[in-house]
Amino acid sequence: MPDVGHQILSKELIDEALILSDMFNLNELMALDLLCTAQAQMPYHPGLTRGLVAIILYYDGRKSLVLALKTLVLARRGYTFAVECSEEVSDFVTEFTDDMMTDNLIQRLIDQIDSLDLCKELELLQQNRALGGAKHHKQVTTLIHRGLVYLRLFF
């Protein structure tokens, strides 16, 4: 493993990483990193397994990425009334987001938003037994819903 060296991983951890990788189309090492982060976050989510915490972190991360992108766009030149930043930062952000648009990233994001469906996401989680009890189900549903709302409001 990069940055960690040689370690023996449990079959359970490997299986969980493969399931997450397949579910969310993640690189296996990214899925493993998500599970390791979830393991560290378990004290903040009493009663949930590592895999269930990883699901919460995954959707929370997606929501955070959307909010970060929104902040970047609001910091572009011409939107300085929305985000207070120096002219130099605004110029850098404008150039960066222009590159994103040139690379068609914005259109790909919009296409992804159009394909997102709360029911399909929940069905995927249920098929992979990745939804816990009622509290976990509500947390995940809320995160997915908020992410969709932020995406749709933003784009």
Image: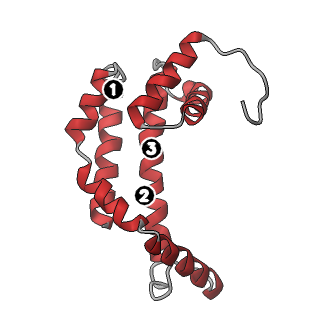
Residue 100 is at least partly visible in this image: yes
Residue topped by disc 1: 135
What kind of element bears circle 3?
Answer: helix
Residue 118 on image: x %, y %: 23, 41
Q: Does residue 36 appear to the left or right of 82 in the view shown?
A: right
Residue topped by disc 3: 60
Image quarter where the C terminus lies is bottom left
Q: Nearer the viewer, residue 3 or 141?
A: 3
Locate residue 42: give its quadrant: top right
Label ID, residue 93:
none
Q: Nearer the viewer, residue 77 or 96?
A: 96
- The residues bearing labels 1 and 3 have C-alpha atoms spaced at a distance of 16 Å
Q: Does residue 144 appear to the left or right of 62 in the view shown?
A: left
What residue is rendered at 32% in x and 49% in y?
Answer: 146
The mark nearer the N terminus, 1 or 2, is: 2
Residue topped by disc 2: 66
What kind of element bears circle 2?
Answer: helix
Q: Nearer the viewer, mark 1 or mark 2?
A: 2
What residue is rendered at 50% in x and 74% in y?
Answer: 97
Say what amino acid the circle numbered 2 marks: Val
Q: Nearer the viewer, residue 151 or 22?
A: 22
What residue is rendered at 63% in x and 84% in y?
Answer: 86
Say what amino acid the circle numbered 1 marks: Lys
Residue 84 is at least partly visible in this image: no
Mark 3, other Cα within 10 Å: few <14 / some 14–19 / many ≥20: some
Q: Are marks 1 and 2 in contact (CB under 8 Å)?
A: no
- The residues bearing labels 3 and 2 have C-alpha atoms spaced at a distance of 10 Å
Residue 116 on image: x %, y %: 26, 48
